[in-house]
C-alpha cells in the first residue's frame, strides 16, 4: 500500500526530471533541502531584524524579535535559574527552527522536514551532545559519573552494587533520551501530514475537515516545538543536578 502524501515542490521537480541524474539527489536530500530553506529564511529575518538595531525598537520586526527572545529567555531561566541564560541561544534556536519547520509543511507544495526521523534525530543528538558536554564541564567526568550513580545514598553508599546499578541505568536512559525525543516530534508531525494527505484525497467533500485539521496542525506544530524545547531544558537541569536545583530554589 502506497503511503498518501501531499505534493511538494522538490518531489514534483524530481518526478519531472526522472531521467536526469539530479533527480536521485532531490529524492535523497529532500528533507535537507527543506531544512536549509528554513535556515535561509531565518538567517534573512535575523539580518533584517538586527540591521538597524536600536535601544528602543523602531521597527515591528525588531520589536517582534526582541519579544520572542525575551519570552524564550524567561522560559529557560524559569527552569534553570539565572545561570540558564547561557543556554537561551541554543534552546531558543531549537525552538524557532523546529517551529518553522513544523509550520512550513502547512504551506501548499512545501514539506515539514521534521516529519523525517533523520532530521529530528539529528536535532536530538545535538541536544544529547551539548547536555553531556555541559555536565562533564561543570562536574568533571568522575563527578558526572558520581552524579549519575545517584544521591543521597545513605547506608547504601558503602555498597558498590546499588550505585553501580543506578549508574548503568542512568547511562542507558541518557542514550534513550535522544531516541524518544526525536521520535515524539517526528511521529506527531508525520501523523499530521499523513492525516492531511488522506483528507485531501477526499476532494471537495473533505475540504471542511481539511481546513479544520490544518488549524489543528498549527496548534500541534507549536506544541511539539514547545515540548522539544521544554524537554531539552529539563535535560540540562537533570544533567547539572544540584547546581541547577539551587538556582531554581
Image (spheres, rainbow, N blue to C red):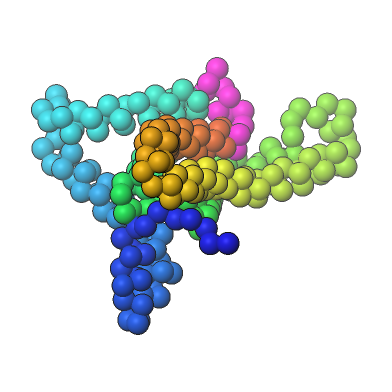
Residue 136 appearing in the image: no
Task: Give above or below for 174 relative to 35.
Answer: above
- Give left or right: position of 32 versus 178: left
- Give left or right: position of 196 versus 150: left
Say which quadrant the N terminus sits in: bottom right
Q: Residue at x 41, y 59 (%)?
A: 31
- Give left or right: position of 17 versus 194: left
Q: Which residues are magenta?
A: 238-249
Residue 222, x across and y down, in percent: 41, 34
Residue 66, x across and y down, in percent: 25, 30
Q: Is residue 235 highlighted in magenta? A: no
Residue 42, x across and y down, in percent: 27, 46
Magenta segment main secondary structure: helix
Residue 15 appearing in the image: yes
Foreground of the two, 69 or 188 = 188
Say which quadrant the C terminus sits in: top right
Q: Is residue 243 highlighted in magenta? A: yes
Q: Residue at x 55, y 46 (%)?
A: 187
Residue 173, x across and y down, in percent: 69, 44
Give the farthest residue toward the front.
Answer: 205
Residue 10, picture quadrant:
bottom left
Q: How many marks?
A: 0
Q: Residue at x 43, y 69 (%)?
A: 28
Foreground of the two, 19 or 182 = 19
Residue 241, picture quadrant:
top right
Q: Residue at x 84, y 33 (%)?
A: 157
Residue 208, picture quadrant:
top left
Task: Give above or below for 62 relative to 168.
Answer: above
Amino acid at each position: 500500500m502506497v503511503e498518501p502524501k501531499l505534493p511538494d515542490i522538490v518531489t514534483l521537480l524530481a518526478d519531472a526530471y526522472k531521467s536526469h541524474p539530479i533527480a536521485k539527489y532531490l529524492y535523497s536530500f529532500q528533507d535537507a533541502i527543506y531544512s536549509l530553506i528554513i535556515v535561509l529564511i531565518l538567517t534573512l529575518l535575523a539580518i533584517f531584524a538586527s540591521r538597524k538595531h536600536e535601544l528602543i525598537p523602531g521597527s515591528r520586526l525588531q520589536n517582534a524579535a526582541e519579544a520572542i527572545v525575551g519570552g524564550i529567555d524567561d522560559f529557560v531561566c524559569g527552569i534553570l535559574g539565572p545561570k540558564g541564560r547561557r543556554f537561551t541561544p541554543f534552546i531558543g534556536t531549537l525552538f524557532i527552527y523546529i517551529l518553522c519547520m513544523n509550520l512550513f509543511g502547512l504551506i501548499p507544495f512545501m514539506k515539514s522536514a521534521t516529519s523525517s526521523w533523520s532530521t529530528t534525530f539529528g536535532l536530538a543528538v545535538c541536544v544529547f551532545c551539548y547536555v553531556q558536554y555541559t555536565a562533564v564541564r561543570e562536574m568533571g567526568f568522575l563527578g558526572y559519573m558520581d552524579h549519575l550513580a545517584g544521591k543521597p545514598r545513605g547506608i547504601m553508599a558503602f555498597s558498590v552494587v546499588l550505585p553501580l546499578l543506578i549508574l548503568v541505568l542512568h547511562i542507558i536512559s541518557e542514550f534513550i533520551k535522544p531516541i524518544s525525543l526525536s521520535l515524539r516530534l517526528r511521529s506527531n508531525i508525520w501523523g499530521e501530514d499523513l492525516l492531511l494527505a488522506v483528507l485531501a484525497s477526499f476532494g471537495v467533500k473533505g475540504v471542511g475537515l481539511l481546513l479544520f485539521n490544518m488549524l489543528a496542525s498549527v496548534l500541534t506544530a507549536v506544541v511539539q516545538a514547545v515540548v522539544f524545547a521544554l524537554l531539552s531544558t529539563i535535560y540540562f537541569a537533570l544533567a547539572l543536578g544540584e547546581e541547577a536545583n539551587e538556582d531554581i530554589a
